[in-house]
Amino acid sequence: MPQLAQWAASWPEKIAAVFPDSGAVLRFGALDARANQVANGLLALGLAPGQAVALLLENSPDFLVLTYGAKRAGLMVTPLSIHLRPNEVLHVLRDSGAVALVADASLGALVAKLDLAAIPHRFATGGELPGFASLTELMVGQSSAWPAGELPIGREFLYSSGTTGLPKGIRRPLIAYADRLAPEFDMSWQQLYGFDEKTIYLSPAPLYHAAPNRYVQRTINLGGTAIILRKFDAARCLAVMAEYGVTHSQWVPTMFVRLLALPPEIRAAHDLSHHRCAIHAAAPCPAPVKRAMLDWWGPIIWEYYAGSEGIGTCVIDSATWLRKPGSVGRPVYGRVHILDDGGKSLPAGEIGRIWFEGGARFAYHNDPIKTAEAYNDRGWATLHDLGWLDEDGFLFLSDRRADLILSGGVNVYPAEIEAVLMAHPRVSEAAVIGVKDAEFGERPRALVVARDGAGDGALAEELLALCRAELAGPKQPRAIEFVAELPRSEAGKLLRRVLKERYL
């Protein structure tokens, strides 16, 4: 697969990345040269292959320069969410063994709460930070040529979003120098989505998350151009898509909800005729939301199911989804099995734990127990999600095992109840959790965001009646509570643990 250095040699003036919020532009030649300066600067500090460099940055050109540069020095790159709490940041820094940290000066309030005595090399970008050298000092006087010696190539050392506890690291081996031009992951995504050197890819999400991080780099590695917003704003996204002629984009369902909430005149004001592929993942997309997006954008929407662990991938296109609403597709990488808690294969239609066979091996850093729990005796791996296969081998998600509600001895899957609630036209978002109940052990409670922002008793009665009509007794929520918003990670995943904490 052609890489950044090769495109830099062929098309040094071609634009690799644009940051519309700041007006910054990175051309292939400049990105390549600056990445080499970073690599040589890090090596000059004495950093050794396999050590970790942490990035606490907003979306910016420096994020890409540092990522490419650190990997060329054989280092592991650990992006940190700028919305983590100080204890969570410190956990990742310590767990990853980071020996260098690069932080954005705009995050000074967060940085000031961190005990960084164990990190010997600290650099600031975008201004000054106490105890930090300028990133310019790392790069000044360094060669803009590829580092000398046949060093291995580093990787992203990503941490989970921490939806069920502290973030956990997913570490893979370094890439041998001889394999530096080989693809890091299965290449089915390129053929499926039609990425090439003409791609103009919109990333409206933070680069410290796995999907935008990887797809921005994939776009650049193929010679395309990435359009990177500082943060998601629905109207801004449409304007940028029209301005730059975006061909590909990636979203999470919450973004779809907010796009659909825009006034009709704003939705119709922008020319999206270049847009031929919209990808979404990270969380289940309610069927009414996806149908509305298909009505608007047409059959260009692709959904995939995967994880940062890289154990397997399922994909479904628009036409197939309309035949199989709610499915996340069939595997394009790895083979899917549904097993019960005893490891027995389940027939079509029965819910069990989802396992992938044949995917890449991984380990949760410093957590051999959690790693062992992710594999069975046949070497298959799981993300601990629950789901079922239909007769044609299409996968449907239910929930994570940790979210299962046991009510009166019956397994209750929150996603099933949420899908019923989301079918009501006045519901924007819905989440269901189990709360303690003296008689049943647990009973489902529904938390709803009303589309008009004002839920009332009449709507609550309508939703309860809808649930009574569509769901068996143990699955029916006892009450509907209206909330202004649901807690979600920046990747759009529902933070169900935050909701549970409110009721424990």
Image (spheres, rainbow, N blue to C red):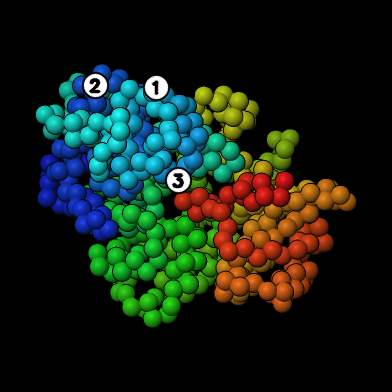
Residue appearing at x 25%, y 44% in the figure: 126
In the image, is residue 294 above or below residue 92? below
- Tell me if label 2 and label 3 are in contact, CB under 8 Å: no
In this figure, what is the number of numbered marks?
A: 3
Residue hosting label 3 = 83
Nearest-to-viewer mark from 2 and 3? 3
Residue drawn at 71 percent across, 50 percent down: 503
Q: Give the amino acid at mark 2.
A: Leu
Q: Position of residue 240 (x, y in %)?
A: 29, 65
The alpha-carbon separation of the residues under discs 2 and 1 comes to 16 Å
Disc with the residue nearer the chain's start (2 vs 3):
2
Q: Earlier in the sequence, mark 3 or mark 1?
A: 3
Residue holding disc 1 = 118
The N terminus, quarter of image: top left
Q: Is residue 485 or residue 37 the one in the foreground?
A: 485
The residue sitting at 72% across, 74% down in the picture is 457
Q: Nearer the viewer, residue 331 or 381?
A: 381
Q: Residues within 10 Å of mark 1 (few under 14, many from 20)?
A: few
Label 1 secondary element = loop
Query: Residue 68 location, x and y as percent?
Result: 26, 37
Is the residue under label 1 in contact with that under label 2 (CB below 8 Å)? Answer: no
Q: Amino acid at mark 3?
A: His
Q: Amino acid at mark 1?
A: Ala
